[in-house]
Amino acid sequence: MSNKIVKLDKLTINKIAAGEVIERPASVVKELVENSIDAQSRKITINIQEGGKKTVEVIDDGMGMESNDARLSINRHTTSKINNADDLFSIHSLGFRGEALASIVSVAQVEIITKTEESDLGIHLVIEGGEIVSDKQASAPKGTLISVKNLFFNVPVRRKFLKTTSTEVNHITEYVTKLALANPSISFTLTHNGKDILTAPKGDLIAQITAIFGENIARACLPINKKENDYTVTGFITKPEFSRKSKDYLYIFVNGRAVTNKVISEAVLRGYGTSVPHNRYPIIFLYFDLPPDEVDVNVHPTKKEIRFSNEAKVYALIESATRESLEKSGLKLFETVTETRHKPTTLTSIETKSLESSKKKLPVSVSPRERPDYTIVKSKEQRIDKFLPITDKNIELLEKSFERKKSIRVLGIIKDTYIVAETQEGLFLCDQHAAHEKINYEKYIRQIKKKSVSIQQLLAPVSVTLKPSEFEIIESIKENLKSFGFEIEIFGKNEILIRSIPAIMGVTIEFNSAKDMIDIFKTNVSEIKEKLDLEDLGFIKEIVSIFACRRSIKAGDKITLDRAELLLKELLELEEPFACPHGRPTIIILNEKYIEELFKRDYR
C-alpha cells in the first residue's frame, strides 16, 4: 500500500516559498536592493528589461561576499542578519528571513558575481532552478552583481499572471522610490531597457525629494520633528493644498523600512484636521523610529505589514507632531467632524399616495424608465392651482396622471441655489448645481459613445511634474487618452504638458484638477488601454465629474427664471435625471401628504 503523504523535494519546497516572497519582478528588485542596503552600499544601480520579466540586474558597491558565503546564500534559511529566535524581536536590518535569494534562484536563471575588499578575486556563480551549474573565480570590483533572468521560467502558471510591462515597471519604480527616500545617503539609479527612469544622487532628504518629485513639491514641504522618550518622528509633510486623490503619496518609514500602516496614516490625517477635504490625502515623507523590540516586522513574508506594541502612543505622537508642524507654518486647523448632529431625510423616489378608501395603490417608486414625463410651463402663463385632492371620484384621474406628461411651473429660486417649482405631486425642489453637473456629464458621455469627442486646445498648456512611476504610466497611455479628448505631450524628464481637453470642459484647467486627473488615469490603466464598453469604465465618471462640476452653474450663481426652466427641461429629458454623477440627489419632491403633516393637517 502506497503512502499518501510524501516529503516534497527541495526544488518544489523552494518554489512554494517563492510564491510567498517573490510575487513579481518588483519583489525581486525589493529583496536584492534591500540586501545591497544591508551590505552598506553607497551606490546601487538597478537595470531591468521588459518590465523585469526578462532581466533584473542589481549592482552595488557594498561589502561583497566570500566564496563560501556566496554559495551558502542561495540556500533557504541562511542569513547573516540574525542568529536565533530571540533576534526576531530586535531586527535592525531590512532582510532577516534568509528566504529571498533561495526563492529567486529556484524560479529564475541567476548569476552572482561578488567580491570583498580583502579578496584578490571574486566568485562567479551561475544558478538555474536552484542548482549551481557554474562556479569559478572572476575578476570583479568590490561589491555584488546579481542578474536574474527569465523569472518564473520553470513555473509558467506564475509567469502568465504577470501584468503588462508598463504595470511591472510602475511597481518596480515605486519600490525603488521608497528605498531611495528611506536611504538618502545612498545613490540610486534605475534603468529600463537602457533608459534612465529614476536617478537619486546621495544627499539629504530634501535633495532626494527634489530629484524624484520635483521642486514644486520640495518647496511645499514643511519639516516635522518631535521626540518623546524613545519615539522620534521626523521628515516632511506638505501644505494642505497639495493634497491628492490617491493615497500613494503617503510615504511612511518605520525604523528605515517602507511600510503601509493604518495607525500612522490615520494619525496624520487627524493631525491635518479639516484642512484636507474628505477622501483626499496629503503628500508626506514621514520617518518614525522606535525601539526595535516595540515593533513586530515579522508579520508577513513581504515585511510590508508591521504591528506596534503600543498603538495608542504611536497614534497620539504622530497626530500631535503633524498638527504642530502645520500650526508652526501659520495654518489654522479645525477639529475633524466625525458625525453630524442632525440626520436629514431625502426623498429619493417619487412616492405616491395611499388610496385607503378604494384599497388601490399607485406604484410606490418609479424607475427611470417608467417614471412620468414632465413638461415645463411658464409660471406667468398659469396660476398656482390647489393640490389635487384625493377622493374616490378621481382615483382614475390620478392613475392616468402617471401615464401622461406632467406640468412643472417654476415659482422661484431660493438663495440662488435651489429651484422651486410646483407639480401635481407637491413641491418640487432642484439643486441647480447638481442638475447642471448631470447635464454636462451626460453630454460628454454621449460624445464618447459616438466616438466624436470635441477637443479644445488649452489657451495655456498645463505643466505637471510627475514622480517617476507616474511618468512611466502616463507615457504608456497618452495615445489611448486621445479617444477621451485629452492630448498630453512629454516635456522633459518626468514632466508632461496637458495641451488639450474635451471641449465641453472649457478652455482652461486648474493645476489641482490636472493633478486629480493624473491620479485617476494612473489607477485605471487597464480600463483605458483595453477600451472596454463605456458602461464598464468606472474612471469616466470620476474624470468627467471633476470637469462637469467645475463647468456647471454653482450654488450662489444668479440665474433667471427662464434659465431655470431650461435647466429643468434639459435635466428631465435625461434617462436618469434624479442623481448627479457623484450620487447626490438633483431633485427632491415634497409630496402633498408630507406637507400636510408638516402643517398638522393630517388629522391624526
Image: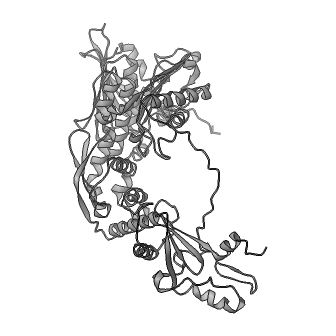
Q: Is 318 drawn above or below residue 52 in the view shown?
A: above
Quadrant (top left, top right, bottom left, bottom right) of the N terminus: top right
| Residue 287 x/y as whole percent | 45, 25
| Residue 84 x/y as whole percent | 56, 15
Residue farthest along the bottom direction in this orientation: 393
**How many labels sit on residues?**
0
Q: Is 272 drawn above or below residue 564 in the view shown?
A: above
Q: Nearer the viewer, residue 8 or 484?
A: 484
Q: Is 142 drawn above or below residue 104 in the view shown?
A: above
Is residue 517 among the parts visible in the rendering? Answer: yes
Position of 1 with respect to 417 (left or right) is: right
Q: Quadrant of residue 171?
A: top left
Which color scheme did the rendering employ for the protein? Answer: one colour
Quadrant (top left, top right, bottom left, bottom right) of the C terminus: bottom right
- What's the residue at 62%, 90% (across, down)? 397
- What's the residue at 62%, 50% (across, down)? 340
